[in-house]
Amino acid sequence: MLALRLARGSHPLVMLRRLLVSAASAGVGFLLLCTLGYAMGHPDDSSASLLRLLWCVLPLVATVHFAVAVARTDPSTRPCESLSALGYGPGRMSALAAASTALSCTLGSSLALLVYLHLRGDITGMPFDGAAAELLAAGRPLPLAAALTLLSVVPVSAALSVALILRPRRTPLPKEGALDEALEEPAAPEPAKKPTAPPAGLPWGMALLALGLALETYSAGNRSGATLSLPGGSDGSPTGVLVGWALTAAGLAFAGPGITHLCGRLLQAYRPCATRLLAGRALMEEARRIGRPLGVAAAVASATIAVTTVYGQGDGRPFGPLTGLGATLVMACTTATLLTSALESRQARVDTKDALLRLGASAAMLRMAAALRAVTLLAVFAPLTWAVAALAALPLQG
């Protein structure tokens, strides 16, 4: 009930982000229900049904990632004095964030069920009654337990992820006698802040990237193996090629924070001015917060370019509607997650920005530093994404 009251009193932009989470949840729920409908209409083709169910994993992961990013930037789930006085500490606030996320995702899943029943023809009185009756196995009764189980996957996964990521970190208790020693001894001067340590994912990301490209090249040359096609696709591809694509995408995602940190170091190299110093240090500080969704967005973009290059060369439609819906959900969720993470980074730098303004820094210099960060990331990630996509599509061309 408290989560519902906080949702009703939120800022319009916060409400918009929650509605976007509901829309993404509705899309994933509809995909899962369509998979159930295909399994009902084709009981003898279990492999194709399993393939469609596996294809729903990517939109599901993208939606959960987006829901976590929205929960992190939600001001109503942050600790405040009024809620702390009522007993809502950090632990309960994380539970409140999970409840708000589950509420948004449940709304989307309910909408998906209504649309699915409407397109099946079970709910009439609106346009497009039974428009997809044959595709959704309208002649067979819908197993309600299976449908509700599938629809609960997104709310449960998103709520558990939010509760796990936003849980309060335990601080170690001081040892016996440490407090007395601190009160008798004079206060020591605070040590200078060490530079931000680079993220450890860059070598692993590069290794996964190289492994994926090598696997693609080997599998494309050996066409005698098993093939795997996307739902609604025109033809199949070697399974090793698709696994290689997944490895290259994972490599970009792992390497994203390290590449962002490296961009910050490059900005500060060779006689940097104040603007370059501010931009580079901000990139180094925000490498983990911005680099992860940026790496995921680059991975999705490279996979999209590679798939479009390989399968979009013909005149016909290479993909079916469900494949297109899933790909649209993945791209939309990754883009929205990146923008939400950028907003979170901006909120985290508010105190630093105010301190710089009090010290005499101009607002124009701060805007120039922000623009320099964006241009640097674009100049590094755009060619890298295109190069990975071209290398990934090269084994299947010709």
Image (tube, rainbow, N blue to C red):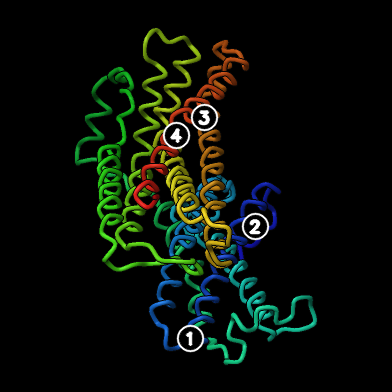
Residues under numbered marks 4 and 1 in contact, where contact means CB atoms less than 8 Å apart: no
Q: Residue type at mark 1? A: His
Q: What is the secondary structure assignment of the residue under circle 2?
A: helix
Disc 3 versus disc 1: distance between alpha carbons?
54 Å
Q: Mark 3 against mark 4, which lies toward the viewer?
A: 4
Q: Give whichever of discs 2 and 1 has the lower sequence position.
A: 2
> Which amino acid is tagged 4?
Phe
**Vertically, is 366 above or below 302?**
above
Q: Which residue is mark 2?
A: 19
* Residue at disc 4, secondary structure: helix
The location of residue 336, given as percent across then percent down, is 56, 47
Above or below, 347 relative to 81: above
Q: Is 121 on the left or on the right of 244, as rendered?
A: right
Mark closer to the chain start, 3 or 4: 3
In three-dimensional space, the C-alpha distance between marks 3 and 2, rounded to whole angstroms, equals 26 Å
Give the spatial CA distance, label 3 vs label 4: 23 Å
Rendering quarter of residue 286: top left
Of residue 394 and residue 383, the one placed in the foreground of this image is: 394
Which of marks 2 and 3 precedes in the sequence?
A: 2
Q: Quadrant of residue 277?
A: top left
Residue 42, disc:
1
- Residue matched to label 4: 381
Question: What crowding class fits label 2: few (fewer than 14 Cα within 10 Å), some (14-19), or many (20 or more)?
Answer: some
The reply to whether the C-beta atoms of the residues labelled 2 and 1 are less than 8 Å apart is no
Identify residue type, mark 3.
Arg
The numbered dot on residue 88 is: none
In terms of sequence position, does the residue under pointer 3 or pointer 1 come before the other? 1
